[in-house]
């Protein structure tokens, strides 16, 4: 692979709709290919380690992906009384899977990723995220998560984590009521769905509040939004939205159900609660 980079020495992701961009200084194009599903680029950067870009959108860097992966997994798993069976939809870089496998309660964790090349290239360029891929509790299915959840057995999953790309192209259907209804059906009682729900500053009305309404309309009787910093995603601020399938008292907004028994770099017990504190504009329809 050529070490020449014909573009300027910054990779810039443009958010034309918001008149903004985010850039990282790159030193080398390590890999570029068109998979059957998307354009994949891997760069080395001056300050953020390796960078993965899918269809022009920054997915992760080695420096800061821990924030996103920990917040996509630990609040949901620590809110579930017994998270034995976990399914990750998307998440091909294996970072979320790695965090899920830190929970000793997890007996089986399946990653349902559309694009096998994302996982293969992560094994090569983000090996630290894939160290536990041979854990006997981990399994991999490469295919469309929308179809997979349609065929999933009823009442068979404790936690579903939707770690997808933006709601366009193959990920669009992961943000639909039909998908949420199928997730609700596949979850056991007390089951939790958590989905990355984009930027609070750019997508509060168009995605986050809509997701809460759609989850409610799909049978999830309580929803909860968490926010966290995300230095390389649009606006630098990100969110995940959770829904719980319970007829009794919800545990979503309570303290974590168990102490943290393993090493984390972002998630802490106080952050479990603090990440649910939302600014005024996210609480109302203003
Ligand atoms: N956290 C990242 C972000 O928000 O930028 C996402 C990381 S992960 C690499 C996203 C993955 O979702 C991609 O590898 C993509 O192939 C996968 N994906 C998109 N649509 C999918 C679908 N319908 N089923 C399964 N995986 C899907």
Image (tube, helix red, strand yellow):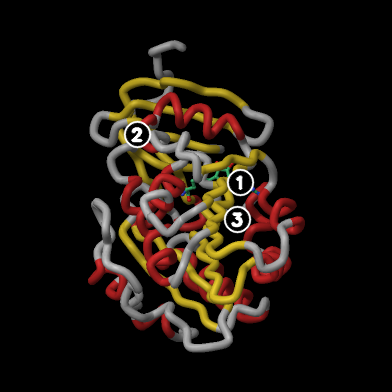
Marks 3/1: CA–CA distance = 17 Å
Name the residue: 40% across, 19% down: 5
Residue under circle 3? 167
Are there few (<14), some (14-19), or many (20+) residues within 10 Å of tag 1?
Answer: many
Q: Closest to the observer: 59 or 234?
A: 59
State yes or no: Cβ of the residue under disc 1 lies below 8 Å from any atom of ligand 1.
Answer: yes
Question: Left of 50 or right of it: where is 136?
Answer: right
Checking the image for residue 112, the label placed there is: 1
- Per the model, the C-alpha gap separating discs 3 and 2 is 28 Å
Residue found 61% across the figure and 46% down from its top: 112
| First reached walking from the N terminus: tag 1 or tag 2 | 1
Q: Is residue 171 above or below residue 210?
A: above
Mark 2 residue element: helix
Q: Which residue is mark 2?
A: 128
Residue lying at 72% horizontally and 61% vertically, measured from the top left: 153
Q: Are marks 3 and 2 in contact (CB under 8 Å)?
A: no
User: How many labels were placed on the picture?
Assistant: 3
Q: CA distance from mark 1 to mark 2?
A: 20 Å
Q: Earlier in the sequence, mark 3 or mark 2?
A: 2
Do the residues under discs 1 and 2 have CB atoms within 8 angstroms? no
Please tell me how crowded label 2 is: few (under 14), some (14-19), or many (20+) other residues with Cα within 10 Å.
Answer: some
């Amino acid at each position: 692979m050529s070490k020449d980079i014909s573009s300027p020495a910054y990779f810039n992701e443009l958010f034309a709709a918001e008149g903004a961009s985010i850039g990282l200084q790159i030193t080398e194009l390590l890999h570029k290919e068109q998979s059957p599903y998307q354009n994949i680029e891997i760069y080395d950067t001056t300050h953020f380690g390796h960078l993965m870009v899918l269809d022009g959108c920054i997915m992760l860097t080695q420096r800061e992906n821990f924030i996103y992966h920990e917040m996509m997994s630990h609040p949901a798993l620590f809110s579930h009384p017994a998270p034995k069976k976990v399914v990750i939809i998307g998440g091909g870089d294996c970072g979320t899977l790695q965090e899920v496998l830190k929970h000793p309660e997890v007996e089986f964790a399946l990653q349902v990723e559309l694009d096998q090349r994302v996982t293969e290239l992560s094994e090569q360029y983000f090996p630290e995220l894939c160290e536990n891929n041979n854990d006997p509790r981990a399994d991999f299915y490469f295919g469309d998560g929308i179809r997979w959840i349609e065929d999933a057995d009823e009442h068979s999953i404790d936690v579903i984590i939707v770690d997808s790309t933006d709601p366009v192209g193959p990920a669009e259907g992961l943000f639909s009521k039909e998908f949420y209804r199928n997730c609700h059906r596949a979850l056991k009682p007390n089951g939790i769905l958590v989905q990355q729900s984009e930027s609070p500053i750019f997508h509060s009305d168009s995605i986050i509040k809509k997701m809460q309404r759609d989850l409610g309309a799909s049978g999830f009787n309580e929803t909860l939004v968490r926010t966290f910093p995300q230095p390389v995603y649009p606006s630098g601020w990100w969110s995940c939205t959770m829904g719980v399938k319970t007829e009794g008292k919800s545990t979503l907004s309570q303290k974590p159900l168990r102490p943290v028994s393993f090493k984390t770099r972002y998630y802490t017990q106080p952050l479990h609660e603090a990440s649910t504190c939302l600014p005024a504009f996210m609480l109302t329809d203003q």
